[in-house]
Amino acid sequence: MALQIGDTAPDFTADTTQGPIKFHEWLGDSWGVLFSHPKDFTPVCTTELGEAARLKPEFDRRNTKIIGLSVDPVDSHKKWEADIEETQGQAVNFPVIGDPDHTVADLYGMIHPKANDTLTVRSVFFIGPDKTIKASITYPASTGRNFDEILRVIDSLQLTSKFSVSTPVNWKDGGDVIISPAIPDDEAKERFPKGFKTLKPYLRMTPQPDK
Ligand code: BEZ
């Protein structure tokens, strides 16, 4: 069965462009984002890796380690990285897993045979410091991902892990959030001293509590 929210992110050892890693040990106490690329020397992947590298300081600021994966071996990734730097103006500054035998891709269900027997789809796994899966997204090879959305999801996951709130449609860091319906009004007044607006008893908006 596919990995689900709440499952432990499978541990593995793998060769990467930055040397061998044991995944859980490498994650340490950080949050993690593991994302797959169908294949080396392909156009969409080239743009994605450049963008992920450009945004690395934003992931660092969120205490989040990022790691890519493609089913080609590490020596191929290293040659490809020269093209990424040349065309995207940004060197890849995080590890990319070489997975020619599909060990990691199979552990995470990144190969969807009805899409392609041998290449991964574009999977993203968001992993918490407790090593459980907090969210995942899946796109086909033909659709490049939006890495601003990946940062936005991390912001929501980190905020909602600290406060009893949810983030509404199109929320961005700094926007108003929704108080959990399980919290009665009198308790909400104490927990959210900036106040809240009751649109419906189940829909109470409050300014983001950590801003
Ligand atoms: C790409 O990255 O452009 C790509 C990779 C595999 C299949 C289709 C597109």
Image (cartoon, rainbow, N blue to C red):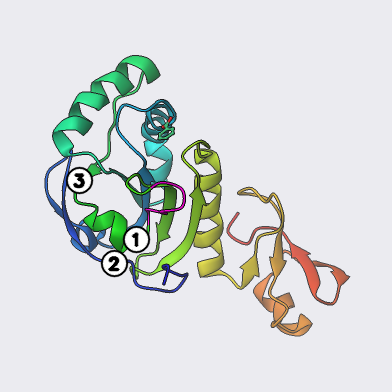
Can you say whether 147 is above or below 163 in the image?
A: above
What percent of the width, then of the height, locates residue 154? 49, 54
Q: Residue at label 2? A: 10
Q: Is residue 193 visible?
A: no
Task: Say if disc 3 is inside 8 Å of ligand 1.
Answer: no
Q: Quadrant of residue 184?
A: bottom right
Lateral position of residue 199 relative to residue 21, left or right: right
Q: Of callouts 3 and 1, which one flags the residue occurring earlier in the amino acid sequence? A: 3
Between disc 1 and disc 2, the foreground one is 1
Quarter of the figure with the C terminus? bottom right
Q: Quadrant of residue 31?
A: bottom left
| Most common secondary structure along the magenta stretch | loop
Per the model, the C-alpha gap separating discs 1 and 2 is: 7 Å
For residue 108, the mark is 1
> Is 80 in front, or is 161?
80
Task: Say if disc 1 is inside 8 Å of ligand 1.
Answer: no
Mark 1 touching mark 2, by CB under 8 A? Answer: yes
Which residue type does callout 1 highlight? Tyr
Asked if residue 179 lies in the magenta stretch, the reply is: no
Query: In the image, which residues are magenta?
Result: 110-116
Query: In the image, what residue occupies the spot 56% across and 57% down?
Result: 156
Which residue type does callout 2 highlight? Pro
Lateral position of residue 163 relative to residue 71, left or right: right
For residue 99, the mark is none
For residue 100, the mark is 3
Quarter of the figure with the N terminus? bottom left
Q: Residues within 10 Å of mark 2 (few under 14, many from 20)?
A: some
Which residue type does callout 3 highlight? Pro
Secondary structure under tag 1 reads loop
Q: Residues within 10 Å of mark 1 (few under 14, many from 20)?
A: some
What percent of the width, then of the height, locates residue 139? 51, 46
Between disc 3 and disc 1, the foreground one is 3
